[in-house]
Amino acid sequence: MFEKVETLLRDYNSMKARVKNLEIDIQLLQVPMIRETPEETLEGVYFARSLESRTQSQGWASDKTSQVAFNYLQANEGINREFEQLRRQDRAAAERERNHLIRLLQKMDNALSSLNEKEQVIIKGFYIDNLRWFEVAEQVMYEERHCKRVRDRAINYMAKSLLGFENYHTA
Protein backbone atom coordinates (compact mmCIF):
# COMPACT_ATOMS: atom_id res chain seq x y z
CA MET A 1 0.00 0.00 0.00
CA PHE A 2 2.92 2.30 0.76
CA GLU A 3 4.16 1.91 -2.82
CA LYS A 4 0.72 2.64 -4.29
CA VAL A 5 0.41 5.91 -2.39
CA GLU A 6 3.99 6.84 -3.18
CA THR A 7 3.30 6.25 -6.88
CA LEU A 8 0.17 8.39 -6.70
CA LEU A 9 2.15 11.18 -5.06
CA ARG A 10 4.89 10.96 -7.68
CA ASP A 11 2.22 11.16 -10.41
CA TYR A 12 0.31 14.04 -8.80
CA ASN A 13 1.61 16.77 -11.14
CA SER A 14 1.22 14.66 -14.27
CA MET A 15 -2.37 13.82 -13.27
CA LYS A 16 -3.14 17.54 -12.95
CA ALA A 17 -1.59 18.18 -16.37
CA ARG A 18 -3.58 15.27 -17.83
CA VAL A 19 -6.82 16.78 -16.50
CA LYS A 20 -6.01 20.08 -18.25
CA ASN A 21 -5.17 18.28 -21.50
CA LEU A 22 -8.39 16.27 -21.33
CA GLU A 23 -10.34 19.50 -20.86
CA ILE A 24 -8.73 20.85 -24.04
CA ASP A 25 -9.63 17.65 -25.90
CA ILE A 26 -13.22 17.79 -24.62
CA GLN A 27 -13.59 21.38 -25.80
CA LEU A 28 -12.30 20.45 -29.25
CA LEU A 29 -14.65 17.48 -29.46
CA GLN A 30 -17.63 19.67 -28.51
CA VAL A 31 -17.17 21.93 -31.53
CA PRO A 32 -19.57 20.66 -34.18
CA MET A 33 -18.17 19.56 -37.48
CA ILE A 34 -18.92 22.01 -40.25
CA ARG A 35 -20.13 20.22 -43.30
CA GLU A 36 -22.68 20.93 -45.96
CA THR A 37 -26.07 19.39 -46.06
CA PRO A 38 -27.01 17.57 -49.28
CA GLU A 39 -29.25 20.52 -50.14
CA GLU A 40 -26.36 23.00 -49.77
CA THR A 41 -24.09 20.91 -51.98
CA LEU A 42 -26.71 20.62 -54.71
CA GLU A 43 -27.47 24.32 -54.42
CA GLY A 44 -23.77 25.03 -54.97
CA VAL A 45 -23.68 22.72 -57.97
CA TYR A 46 -26.76 24.37 -59.45
CA PHE A 47 -25.20 27.78 -58.93
CA ALA A 48 -22.00 26.64 -60.63
CA ARG A 49 -24.11 25.18 -63.43
CA SER A 50 -25.88 28.48 -63.96
CA LEU A 51 -22.49 30.21 -64.23
CA GLU A 52 -21.25 27.59 -66.70
CA SER A 53 -24.31 27.94 -68.88
CA ARG A 54 -23.45 31.59 -69.36
CA THR A 55 -19.97 30.82 -70.68
CA GLN A 56 -20.55 27.49 -72.40
CA SER A 57 -23.12 26.51 -74.92
CA GLN A 58 -23.48 22.98 -73.58
CA GLY A 59 -24.19 22.03 -69.96
CA TRP A 60 -23.12 18.36 -70.12
CA ALA A 61 -20.18 18.92 -67.70
CA SER A 62 -22.50 20.52 -65.14
CA ASP A 63 -25.01 17.69 -65.34
CA LYS A 64 -22.23 15.19 -64.81
CA THR A 65 -20.81 17.24 -61.91
CA SER A 66 -24.17 17.47 -60.18
CA GLN A 67 -24.68 13.71 -60.48
CA VAL A 68 -21.19 13.05 -59.04
CA ALA A 69 -21.88 15.45 -56.14
CA PHE A 70 -25.23 13.83 -55.45
CA ASN A 71 -23.74 10.31 -55.51
CA TYR A 72 -20.88 11.43 -53.24
CA LEU A 73 -23.28 12.86 -50.69
CA GLN A 74 -25.39 9.71 -50.65
CA ALA A 75 -22.36 7.44 -50.30
CA ASN A 76 -20.70 9.47 -47.55
CA GLU A 77 -23.67 10.37 -45.36
CA GLY A 78 -23.32 7.11 -43.41
CA ILE A 79 -19.59 7.69 -42.97
CA ASN A 80 -20.26 11.19 -41.65
CA ARG A 81 -22.80 9.85 -39.13
CA GLU A 82 -20.29 7.21 -37.97
CA PHE A 83 -17.59 9.85 -37.63
CA GLU A 84 -19.91 12.01 -35.49
CA GLN A 85 -20.69 9.00 -33.31
CA LEU A 86 -16.97 8.30 -32.85
CA ARG A 87 -16.43 11.94 -31.82
CA ARG A 88 -19.22 11.60 -29.22
CA GLN A 89 -17.66 8.37 -27.91
CA ASP A 90 -14.21 9.98 -27.71
CA ARG A 91 -15.66 12.94 -25.82
CA ALA A 92 -17.50 10.66 -23.39
CA ALA A 93 -14.31 8.63 -22.76
CA ALA A 94 -12.29 11.81 -22.18
CA GLU A 95 -14.94 13.10 -19.76
CA ARG A 96 -14.92 9.80 -17.84
CA GLU A 97 -11.13 9.84 -17.55
CA ARG A 98 -11.10 13.50 -16.54
CA ASN A 99 -13.79 12.96 -13.88
CA HIS A 100 -11.94 9.93 -12.51
CA LEU A 101 -8.69 11.89 -12.22
CA ILE A 102 -10.44 14.86 -10.62
CA ARG A 103 -11.98 12.59 -7.96
CA LEU A 104 -8.61 10.93 -7.33
CA LEU A 105 -6.86 14.29 -7.02
CA GLN A 106 -9.56 15.51 -4.63
CA LYS A 107 -9.06 12.40 -2.47
CA MET A 108 -5.31 12.94 -2.50
CA ASP A 109 -5.74 16.61 -1.54
CA ASN A 110 -8.06 15.54 1.27
CA ALA A 111 -5.56 12.96 2.51
CA LEU A 112 -2.75 15.54 2.36
CA SER A 113 -4.78 18.12 4.25
CA SER A 114 -5.40 15.58 7.04
CA LEU A 115 -1.64 15.51 7.79
CA ASN A 116 -0.06 17.89 10.25
CA GLU A 117 1.80 20.92 8.91
CA LYS A 118 5.31 19.42 8.98
CA GLU A 119 4.12 16.20 7.33
CA GLN A 120 2.43 18.22 4.59
CA VAL A 121 5.59 20.23 3.94
CA ILE A 122 7.65 17.02 3.74
CA ILE A 123 5.25 15.16 1.45
CA LYS A 124 4.50 18.11 -0.81
CA GLY A 125 8.12 19.20 -0.89
CA PHE A 126 9.55 15.83 -1.86
CA TYR A 127 6.81 14.39 -4.09
CA ILE A 128 4.96 17.35 -5.56
CA ASP A 129 7.56 20.13 -5.60
CA ASN A 130 10.36 17.64 -6.45
CA LEU A 131 12.75 19.00 -3.85
CA ARG A 132 15.75 16.99 -2.74
CA TRP A 133 15.80 15.59 0.80
CA PHE A 134 18.27 18.15 2.11
CA GLU A 135 16.02 20.96 0.80
CA VAL A 136 12.96 19.44 2.46
CA ALA A 137 14.92 18.98 5.69
CA GLU A 138 15.92 22.65 5.61
CA GLN A 139 12.31 23.75 5.30
CA VAL A 140 11.12 21.81 8.35
CA MET A 141 14.42 22.07 10.24
CA TYR A 142 14.75 18.31 10.70
CA GLU A 143 17.54 15.96 9.77
CA GLU A 144 17.08 14.11 6.48
CA ARG A 145 16.72 10.75 8.27
CA HIS A 146 13.98 12.13 10.47
CA CYS A 147 12.20 13.59 7.40
CA LYS A 148 12.19 10.12 5.85
CA ARG A 149 10.69 8.61 9.02
CA VAL A 150 8.01 11.31 9.08
CA ARG A 151 7.38 10.62 5.37
CA ASP A 152 6.90 6.91 6.07
CA ARG A 153 4.37 7.59 8.83
CA ALA A 154 2.54 10.17 6.71
CA ILE A 155 2.30 7.88 3.68
CA ASN A 156 1.03 5.01 5.83
CA TYR A 157 -1.60 7.35 7.24
CA MET A 158 -2.53 8.53 3.74
CA ALA A 159 -2.80 4.90 2.57
CA LYS A 160 -5.52 4.30 5.14
CA SER A 161 -7.35 7.40 3.99
CA LEU A 162 -6.98 6.75 0.25
CA LEU A 163 -7.22 2.97 0.06
CA GLY A 164 -9.36 2.17 3.08
CA PHE A 165 -8.61 0.33 6.30
CA GLU A 166 -9.64 -3.08 4.94
CA ASN A 167 -7.15 -2.89 2.07
CA TYR A 168 -4.46 -1.52 4.33
CA HIS A 169 -4.67 -4.32 6.90
CA THR A 170 -4.85 -7.13 4.33
CA ALA A 171 -1.76 -5.97 2.46
Image (cartoon, helix red, strand yellow):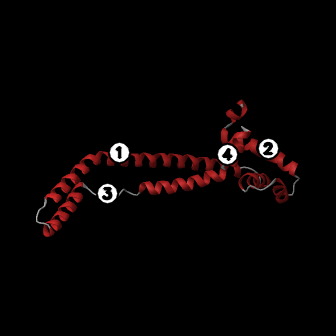
The secondary structure type at the circle numbered 3 is loop
**Mark in the foreground, 4 or 1:** 1
Q: Residue at x 20, y 64 (%)?
A: 48
Label 4 amino acid? Leu
> Which residue is at the far top?
170
Say which label, 2 or 3, has the lower sequence index: 3
Say which residue label 2 marks. 152
Q: Earlier in the sequence, mark 4 or mark 1?
A: 4
Residue 35: image tag:
3
Q: Is residue 59 left or right of residue 154?
A: left
**Is label 4 or label 2 in front?**
4
Q: Secondary structure at mark 2?
A: helix
Name the residue rendered at 17%, 66% in the picture. Answer: 52
Q: CA distance from mark 3 to mark 1?
A: 14 Å
- Relative horizontal placement of residue 144, taking residue 160 as reference (left or right): right
Q: Residues within 10 Å of mark 4 (few under 14, many from 20)?
A: some
The image's mark for residue 82 is 1
Q: CA distance from mark 2 to mark 3?
A: 58 Å
Q: Nearer the viewer, mark 2 or mark 3?
A: 3
Residue 78 is situated, as x and y percent measured from the top left of the image, at: 30, 45
Is the N terminus in the top left, top right, bottom left or bottom right quadrant? top right
Q: First in sequence: mark 4 or mark 2?
A: 4
Q: Is residue 18 left or right of residue 160?
A: left
Mark with earlier residue (1, 2): 1
Amino acid type at image mark 3: Arg
Residue under numbered circle 4: 8
Mark 1 or 2: in front is 1
Depth check, front residue: 132 or 163: 132
Residue type highlighted by circle 1? Glu
